[in-house]
Image (cartoon, grey):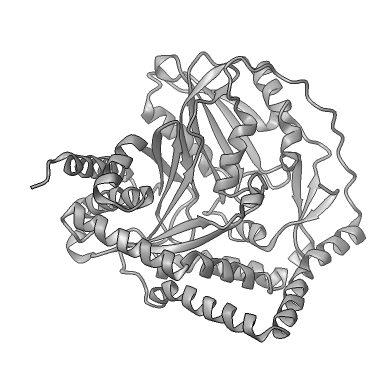
Amino acid sequence: MTAAEPMSVQDATFLHVEDDVTPMHVGGAAILAGPAPDHDELLARFASKLHLVPRYRQKVRFLPLHLGTPLWVDDPHFNLDYHVRRTALPAPGGERELHTLVSRVMSQHLDRARPLWEIWAVEGLSEGRWAVVSKVHHCMVDGVAAADLMSVVFDRDADSAVDAPQPWSPEPAPDLVGVVRRSAAGALRPLAGVRGAAALLRAPRRVLAKGTEAVRASRPFAPLLRPAKATSLNGPIGPHRRWTVARATLEDVRAVRETLGGTINDVVLTAITRGFRDLLEARGELSEIEVVRSLVPVSVRAEGERGVLTNRVSAVFANLPVGLDDPVARHTEIRGQMDGLKQARGAVAGERLVQMAGFAPPMLAAMAGRLAARLPLRTFNTATTNVPGPQQPLYFAGRRLLESSPLIPLAGGVRIVIGIFSYDGTLTFGITGDYATAADVDVLARGIEAGLTELLDLSRKPPA
């Protein structure tokens, strides 16, 4: 990495949409077998890995009046002890106490004057366990890249030795003239798109093919022209969060898929549909709601980009049929929708919109980002993101990772979102809710678990 690297337009958007009630960091809680390492060993473990993730020693530098693309620069005052913190749970150290801690930690904004990440080592969990709560700004990394970081922080062997930290000294930050020059280079990136467009004009058949593909791929976005049904899932949010977890096993999900067909994601979305159905019924709204419209982020990272710490995400939209009483009918409806989106290449449409955003000057992109943060209030009700993780045991300082649950941020008047993470045969659903308006997120969590149980029971029944 250079001494001053321009931030991409999409990464910068996650900074621009952040405001007093919308912290835009991602993270989660990893539960490990105990006992916890002492603080010196904890610091040594992270220090030995930092050379593999140089972004974690960099901070954001903005131009006056946001007239250019923000830059990544080395933090000359980087202090690992500031970012790696230690705390403990009150007795009895159960899920309630852990979830309360995670909710409070994730409600606090990261300090923009420093590298945008924190790690909290949490002692005092029941059964002799401990936890690592991670927190990193979305402008640094998307969900798929965050999963790749697991291979950096965690080990595949329980007896892995601690490597000596590699020497590091910060690159001197450029002066104001240098900052403006580098930021301008980032702002002029759209000219490459213009040159690409000119090249396409010299190949009319390719233009026609690309245009046809874009029109076909944009069809899944047509429903967004109609506002989503008004529910208590949307509305103003406050600065505080609630967080809870639902659990399943990949073995059970695969058993359902083998019987009912479709994909693992289809089964997961069907279980989530049951969760929202239970939530809306408890709120007395189910009789008025037929579907809950969900944003489903999709990675468009090329295979060669695995491990690159930037945001390469697009999105499709799914209508969760909460109005259907039959779980098999819910699965059939969701499977049909997702198959249709694949055929229409809905994720490609989202990527086209991302590319179009690159044609906006940075200040316009910032304005568009702030506007986009408010659009969900009229376009969809929730977001559901599924990130695959490693399917073999991992270790940290010789302690086995037992479970890892994600947390994704709220934005734009969406009051509840769900992140799903798979690890070593398990699935965890990290549910983030607005503190003031989603006090009942546990109803959603238990509904998701009940939804998978009912699908599993149906899959085990002998055919009529």
Compared to residue 448, the image places residue 354 above or below, namely: below
Which residue is at the front of the view, 236 or 264?
264
- Where, by quadrant of the figure, is residue 68 drawn? bottom right
Which residue is at the front of the view, 429 or 344?
344
Which residue is at the front of the view, 441 or 5?
5
Percent of width and height locating residue 201: 70, 85
- Where, by quadrant of the figure, is residue 326 drawn? bottom left
- Identity of the residue furthest to the left in this view: 464
Compared to residue 304, the image places residue 154 above or below, namely: above
Residue at 58% from the left image edge and 71% from the top image edge = 352
| In the image: residue 126, left or right of residue 398 | left
Which residue is at the front of the view, 182 or 210?
210
Compared to residue 156, the image places residue 17 above or below, namely: below
- For the image, the number of numbered tags is 0
Residue at 42% from the left image edge and 68% from the top image edge = 343
Percent of width and height locating residue 397: 60, 18
Report whether residue 320 is seen. no
Report whether residue 148 is seen. yes
